[in-house]
Image (cartoon, rainbow, N blue to C red):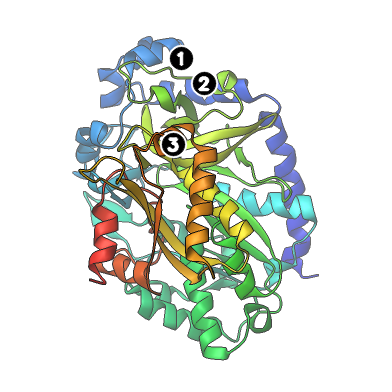
Amino acid sequence: MGVKAWLSKAFAAYIHKKHQQWIQNPAEAQKAVFDHILAKAQSTAFGREHGFAGIKSHADYVKAVPVRDYEGLKSYFNRVKEGEKDVLWPGKPLYLAKTSGTTSGTKYIPITHDSISNHINGARDALLAYIHETGKSEFLNGKMMFLSGSPVLEEVGGIKTGRLSGISNHHVPGYLRTNQMPSYDTNCIEDWETKLDKIIDETIDQRMTLISGIPPWVQMYFDKLMKRTGKQIKDIFPDFSLFVYGGVNFEPYRPKLMESIGKQVDSIELFPASEGFFAFQNEQHDKGLLLLLNSGIFYEFIPTDEYFSENPTRLTIGEVELGVNYALVVSSNAGLWGYSIGDTVKFTSLKPYKVIVSGRIKHFISAFGEHVIGEEVEKAMQLTIGKYKEVELFEFTVAPYVSQNEGESYHEWLVEFARPPHDLKGFEQELNRQMQRLNTYYDDLITGNILADLKVTSLPTGAFRDYMRSQGKLGGQNKVPRLSNDRALADGLLAVYR
């Protein structure tokens, strides 16, 4: 066993012990975060305008600070971006994380001196939790690859600005830098396909042990490797043992990815965002993600069926229930206050608090009152593939098709199969049955002849890749929305091939 692998076990045990302190006292940990961030931000422009000095409880906070998304806080973010100090958090941010918004254009999320450790330590602790649970640490002695955005940073208002994954690249611990792939120069390449070819050049003959990235882009990397070598990944990288991912539900991609690898490897799911590193999978047998309650983020949870009401219920960690869909709202030492990140979660455990990411609050289909969410379409697809075992999936998205004639509207599933079903019609019917089982409103609309059965449109190989390229969103941390309440994405995909 190498020195890094040996030392990591002691460090993992130490971090595990530290985590137990807040895991066993979750409400106290969250109150400490709440009190600290409010006290520190009292003298900021936002703190003065919202009376932070007079806030003594969560109830006071709810009255003083409304829930807002990026658009709602944009005037403050713009002041930060222009270089003004003490707007949302004392001083100026260390970085601005640049991310694409569906309604806000480019968003600039502050990362402060206080909040950067949340991003860096979250990813580190996910690996340490894996080492502590499994005893496996030899992967630290091999090459580790992170498919990420460019680490090249620009300056906006005197603040270094770039993609979160690129910012994080600057904070990889020194003891891991010699193991990190690809090289800095390759990581700086902006064009995804050029970058991917160069990554393959650099990694194809290396002892790769850990690979990390968003599943569809990792699959593209694997496809190119296999095409170049004629081998499965296990034969190219025999020591590859750990896959780390986040950003999307892995299950629809798992069969194809594992077939490409040719053997089962362990995996760790992360829940990172520009707004914070929220949770990670800390046990291999449990898909729930441990919610980080002591890392500078105070959480609120709004039942999704109340989210768009005038005064939605805002619950703290001690008030949540299992199995309820919640919109996630954060306030943090990054200077985010009552900020709706757009993700929805469900708790799978309350001791400790673990979540799964169930979708996006604005990614749903309710063109006919059905309110279908991402979790439901992904589950329906997973169950259907379970019955049609020959099927392998690359990507899919769902959109409504609205007809002027009653009973002729339907949900269109645009699917790029890696390996299509032998019986597409049967696959389509099974998918529809699963959706009826998972969503009672959808079932009512089908049985009431308001909606026709869903239709699967099989897209040619490369459809999503070509569409994302046309939008300037190919590779890196970009994700395809799982479903939409309009036809913009669906029509954009179809337009490529008309």
> Quarter-wise, where is residue 7 in the image?
bottom right
> Quarter-wise, where is residue 114 in the image?
top left
Contact between labelled residues 1 and 2, with CB atoms less than 8 Å apart: yes
Spatial distance from mark 2 to mark 1, Cα to Cα? 8 Å
- Which residue is at the front of the view, 214 or 31? 214
Q: Position of residue 382 (x, y in %)?
A: 57, 53
Marker disc for residue 408: none
Q: In the figure, 8 relative to 219: above or below? A: above
Q: Secondary structure at mark 1?
A: helix
Nearer-N-terminus badge (1/3): 1
Total marks placed: 3
> Quarter-wise, where is residue 44 in the image?
top left
Q: Which residue is mark 1?
A: 58
- Identified by mark 1, the residue type is His
Contact between labelled residues 2 and 3, with CB atoms less than 8 Å apart: no
Marker disc for residue 447: 3
Q: Position of residue 307 (x, y in %)?
A: 37, 25
